[in-house]
Image: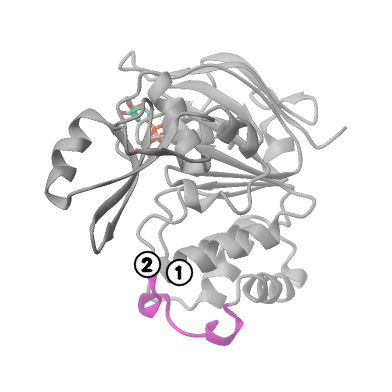
Amino acid sequence: MALELALESVGYRYRSGHEAVAGVDLALTPGIVGLLGPNGAGKSTLMRVLSTLAKATAGRVTWRGEDIARKPDALRRELGYLPQDFGVYEALSAREFLAFLAAVKGLPARSVAARVDACLAMVGLDDVADQRLGGYSGGMRQRVGIAQALLNDPKLLIVDEPTVGLDPEERVRFRHLLAELAGERLVILSTHIVSDIEASAATLAVMARGKLRFHGAPEALMAAAEGQVWQWTLPADQLAEARTRLKISRAQRRAHGVEVRVVGEQPSDDAVRVAPDLEDGYLWLLHRSGEAVDA
Ligand SMILES: Nc1ncnc2c1ncn2[C@@H]1O[C@H](COP(=O)(O)OP(=O)(O)OP(=O)(O)O)[C@@H](O)[C@H]1O
């Protein structure tokens, strides 16, 4: 069966009664899919459903045509998952930790050492593989997280908010790494930060309040904001007030004031229309969906 993850009217309702995911239809094929959405949109809940850690309370998900609720093992065998709250054992080295996880995952004992080495090399940790994880930076720990997700050479790689807590340099490095790993895999990367996925994702899915608001190419998200994006320079002391009434996708300090990009109606006669970028397109979509979001 083709490598496809298909979601049909997928919903998830917590026991509290809160409906975190509602009516999501998606058909995903190899490549990087960026799952974007503000905090609380339902991304982590959906990722848990797709990883078989939670069962959809409505609709169904199929992997290679098989219902994952009925036959979870078929997906699990091909799944690599990096959860949002991934933790490491600080006393172990990366090599020891991965060997432990490989054994837990049931990799054949004779192939563990070679596979651990290969995964460490893929994430660029081979030089520090024998150092204790307690001394690793946030970015290095996240790379260990990716390495463990790659142990079984997954065809489906699910990565939940992997850049949270990383410094800008680590963030960039991590993005490059994920882009390199895509290949023939389906990689689903969730984030609330547009720049995490703008260079790598060929497909975007945007969620807000549990619902899918957009699915398609980044260009289509940008095109939807055509004619709605303005560049405007205003005195720095007016920025706070402007933020209360305008959707500002970006603000940059300049010698003569603050240059902002505004999404929506022309904020002032001296504002000039500019071509939307992905951040603008995302903000415009959320704005139209009635979401109050700070970019
Ligand atoms: N165990 C739970 N019981 C009840 N509601 C929950 C539970 N976990 C999450 N929720 C709610 O479900 C909604 C979606 O949460 P989820 O964590 O999936 O969002 P998210 O898009 O991943 O955001 P974040 O990036 O903040 O994790 C939120 O309103 C959240 O408060």
Decide: is 31 above or below 214. Answer: below
Looking at the figure, which quarter contains the C terminus? Answer: top left
Decide: is 65 above or below 77. Answer: above
**Residue 40 position in % (x across, y down):** 35, 31
Secondary structure under the numbered disc 2 in the rendered image: loop
Mark 1 and mark 2: span between their CA atoms?
5 Å
Q: Looking at numbered disc 2 in the image, what kind of residue is underneath it?
A: Asp
Q: Looking at numbered disc 1 in the image, what kind of residue is underneath it?
A: Glu
Quarter of image, res 66: top right
Q: Residues within 10 Å of mark 1 (few under 14, many from 20)?
A: some
Looking at the figure, which quarter contains the N terminus? Answer: top right
What residue is shown with label 1? 170
Q: For this view, does 63 lie left or right of residue 242?
A: right
The magenta segment is 125-138
What residue is shown with label 2? 167
**Residue 15 position in % (x across, y down):** 35, 17
Q: Is residue 191 visible?
A: yes
Mark 1 touches mark 2? (CB < 8 Å): yes
Residue 35 vs residue 246, the one in the foreground:
246
The magenta stretch spans residue 89: no
